[in-house]
Structures are given as C-alpha cells and as structure tokens.
C-alpha cells in the first residue's frame, strides 16, 4: 500500500489506511511492532501523531527523541491497550533496551509499538516487525509505503 502526502489533511486518511493494515497483521501471540523507516524530517513522528489520533489518543504526541520512549493508554481499541512510541536514534544496543523493559513490551499482545529508526536496533527487533517507509518526494510531499 502507498500514500502520497501533499497536504497535511492527507495524513489522517493515510493513517486510517495504515491502521487498518496494522489491525490485520496483529496477533494475540506478541506485540505488534511497526518500524518507521525514513530520513530525518521525513515525518515519522507526524505519522505517529496521526495514528495515535486515529486510536483515540487525546494527549499531545511528541517525539520521544530525548526520553527514548513514550506510552499512551488506548481505551477503545479491541486489540491494543497501549501505544508505545520509541525513538531508537540514540539507543546503543541491548543495554539501552533493557531499561525500556523491551522483552516484556514485545511479548505483550496488547502493545502496539512504533519504533522510529528501527535500523539502529535491527538485531534486537523481533522477526515479525512490520515496516513502514516514509520518503521525501520534495519539500512539501512525502510518500508513505508498507
């Protein structure tokens, strides 16, 4: 699937389509882990914000760059109880992941985990990761594909 985002309003539609696919790939065996792959400024946090809004999150969703991880409770979703947003850009291996309680998080089927910069922790990502690619087309357009 692919979305071309040329206007801010198109992000909601794209997030809705992506969430439908995420719901289809989710299982009851483990967390649903989504890798958000894209260059700096491509729109990873913007897409996360739109997904969170579609999931009913009402609090402000900001980049977890400096805190590494933010969690948002989900009260109205049949599968997910938590949205976990991780920015792996500053993580350095398994020691960094241990303070996030990574193993527990990825084993909980009620977690939807969005990981920005998944390549930085690729060797620790579960085999069932679902990858979303966000690319700059030009200064005002982005391409989101999965």
Image (cartoon, grey):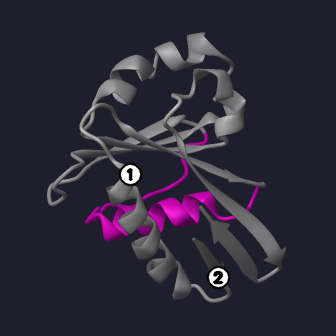
Point 46% across, 82% down: residue: 13
At horizontal 61% and vertical 58% (from top left) the residue drawn is 44
Q: Relative to residue 90, is residue 16 depicted above or below?
A: below
Residue density around tag 2, few if under 14, some if 14–19, many if 20 or more, within 10 Å: some
Span colored in magenta: 40-65
Bin the neighbour count of mark 1 within 10 Å (Cα to Cα): few under 14, some 14-19, many 20 and up.
Answer: few
Residue of label 1: 25
Q: Position of residue 9 (x, y in %)?
A: 52, 88
Q: Is residue 130 left or right of residue 32?
A: right
Against 80, residue 89 (above or below) is above
Residue 80 in the image, given as x and y percentages of width and height: 24, 48
Q: Distance of mark 1 from mark 2, alpha carbons?
A: 24 Å
Q: Is residue 60 magenta?
A: yes
Question: Is the C terminus in the top left, top right, bottom left or bottom right quadrant?
Answer: bottom right
In the foreground, 51 or 59: 51
Residue 91 in view:
no
Nearer to us: label 1 or label 2? 1
User: Circle 2 sits on which residue?
Assistant: 5
Whether residue 28 can be seen here: yes
User: In the displayed structure, would residue 117 be above or below residue 8?
Assistant: above
Q: Residue furthest right?
A: 138
* Residue 104 lies in quadrant: top left
- Give x and y (percent) for residue 84: 39, 42
Residue at the spot 50% in from the left edge and 76% down from the top edge: 14
Cβ atoms at labels 1 and 2 below 8 Å apart: no
Q: Position of residue 100 (x, y in %)?
A: 44, 22
């Amino acid at each position: 699937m692919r979305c071309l985002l040329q206007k801010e309003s198109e992000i909601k539609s794209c997030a809705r389509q992506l969430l439908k696919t995420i719901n289809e790939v989710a299982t009851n065996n483990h967390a649903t882990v989504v890798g958000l792959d894209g260059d700096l400024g491509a729109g990873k946090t913007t897409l996360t914000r739109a997904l969170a809004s579609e999931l009913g999150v009402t609090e402000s969703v900001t980049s977890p760059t400096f805190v590494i991880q933010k969690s948002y409770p989900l009260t109205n979703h049949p599968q997910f109880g938590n949205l976990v947003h991780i920015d792996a850009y500053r993580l350095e291996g398994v020691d960094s992941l241990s303070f996030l309680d990574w193993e527990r998080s990825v084993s909980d089927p009620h977690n939807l985990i969005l990981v920005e910069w998944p390549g930085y922790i690729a060797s620790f990502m579960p085999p069932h990761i679902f990858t979303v690619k966000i690319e700059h087309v030009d200064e005002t357009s982005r391409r989101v594909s999965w």
